[in-house]
Image: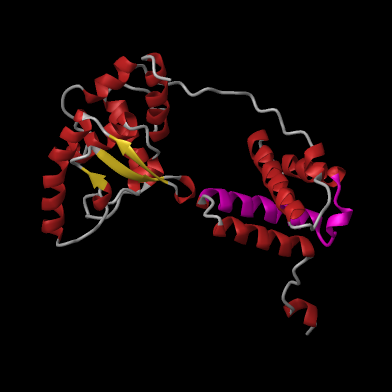
Amino acid sequence: MADNATRAHKRTDVEKSIDQFLRVLREQNASVHTIKAYAGDLDGFAAHIGPRDWKRIDHVVIRGFLSHLYEKGLGKTSVARALAAVRSLYRWLAQEGIVEQNPAKLVSTPKIPKKLPRVPTIEEINSVFDGAMPDASAFPERDRLLFELLYGCGIRNSELIGINLEDVRVSAEAILIRGKGKKERYVPFGGAAAQALSSYLPVRQKLLADKRKSTGAWLVNHRGGRLTTRSVGRIVKKIAVAKGLSPDVHPHTLRHAFGTHMLEEGAD
């Protein structure tokens, strides 16, 4: 038996540097999604580079990597993200004194056509809140509160599901939100959200009592567990369609609508 068949892969200098770079990102509390995306893109970069050391990698080699991604069928958005990952890696390498120049700066970012999301009008959003939740809503009290927070507070889907019971300051009408990079902020909520909250809490308490479960999660599913971003996406789409909105509506659409409508009403 050949030893080469069983010998562990020896990490190249490029792979070792990528490992260190990702470790630094984790220590800096970078977004989990960012780290996962960078890891995938940079693994592909290391595989394309092979055993080359940093001195033998120039802008021509990096352009070759992008061409390789196009040949694999990746779109401009994915290729641009991969280039951004390589540029970030090189900035860190320069800070550490591993390289003197950033050849990725000489590589142009693929031009991506700007596609602005279609934002529902104020009237369309109001139609969701007018009257009772539709039959498509399996948990009306929770789902109304969910919509009030995504649209009324403009928070992200990931921030919504991360809310714990102790994060809600009812008397102050504010919620502690944990955003990207574990940054925390208080977000105020208005009377409509407060009313939705008061309707939801007793139902939540009864559900958990019936299930004999205890959880710190604020928004729960019928099993008493914490909602996931995927579940929130399905809930939003189902209720939006039932209320006559486009099937393209998703949680981030409500965040876009929040910002757009604030500007339309004269906010800074």
User: Magenta segment range?
Assistant: 33-58
Q: Quadrant of residue 76?
A: top right
Q: Quadrant of residue 13?
A: bottom right
Residue 244, position as x, y percentages in the image = 30, 21
Residue 74 appears in view: no
In this rendering, position of residue 206 left or right of residue 146: left
Q: Quadrant of the N terminus?
A: bottom right
Labels in figure, total? 0
Q: Residue at x 15, y 59 (%)?
A: 211
Q: Quadrant of the C terminus?
A: top left
Furthest-bottom residue in this view: 1
Residue 93, position as x, y percentages in the image = 75, 54
* Most common secondary structure along the magenta stretch: helix
Furthest-right residue in this view: 56
Residue 90, position as x, y percentages in the image = 74, 50
Residue 186, position as x, y percentages in the image = 34, 41
In magenta stretch: residue 34? yes
In this rendering, position of residue 109 left or right of residue 214: right
Front-lying residue, 266 or 62: 266
Residue 170 appears in view: yes
Q: Residue at x 78, y 66 (%)?
A: 12
Q: Residue at x 10, y 52 (%)?
A: 206
Q: Residue at x 69, y 59 (%)?
A: 18
In magenta stretch: residue 97? no
In this rendering, position of residue 220 left or right of residue 159: left
